[in-house]
Image (tube, grey):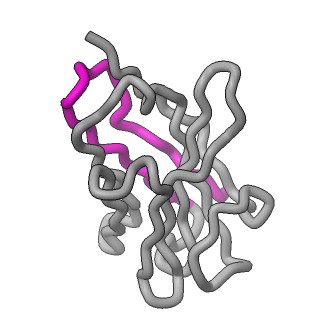
Amino acid sequence: QVQLVESGGGLVQPGGSLRLSCAASGFTLDDYTIAWFRQAPGKEREGVSCISRSDGKTYYVDSVKGRFTISRDNAKNTVYLQMYSLKPEDTAVYYCAATARVMGVTIWAPHYDYWGQGTQVTVSS
């Protein structure tokens, strides 16, 4: 059974850090392009970051550049999103997603076939 499970969310003060994990079961993450999306209350889902299956190229939306880092640990079949200097506007449910159909980076949600259940990130003092 193909499954993605996110973890690592929580409540953090502005300026703090969190590391989200996306663990895969039923398939090998290295064969997939992986992205992180987020959705805040009342807002549309937004692609945040992506790491390609082909060459490990990464992409970040402008609002998180320099603050977030996406990486993969093939031995653990897990992708991470390290988040620094968190801001209240980063508050959202964060989802990881996987696709084998796209070799490069993409944050177009319809490209993704597998989704996790989401983990809540709340940035507040």
Check the image and name the residue furthest to the top.
125
Question: Observer-nearest residue: 16 or 52?
Answer: 16
Would residue 9 be counted in the magenta stretch?
A: yes
Check the image and name the residue furthest to the right.
110
Which quadrant is the N terminus positioned in? Answer: bottom right
For image coordinates 44% across by 81% down, the residue present is 57
Give the percent coordinates (x, y) of residue 45: 67, 40
Relative to 121, 47 lies left or right: right
Would residue 125 be counted in the magenta stretch?
A: no
Position above or below: 119 against 61: above
Question: Observer-nearest residue: 98 or 75?
Answer: 98
For image coordinates 39% across by 50% down, the residue present is 64
Q: Is the magenta stretch mostly helix, strand or loop?
A: strand
Give the percent coordinates (x, y) of residue 32: 57, 75
What is the magenta range? 1-25
For image coordinates 29% across by 34% down, the residue present is 86
Which quadrant is the C terminus positioned in? Answer: top left
Task: Determine the image quadrant of residue 98.
Answer: bottom right
Give the percent coordinates (x, y) of residue 74: 35, 74
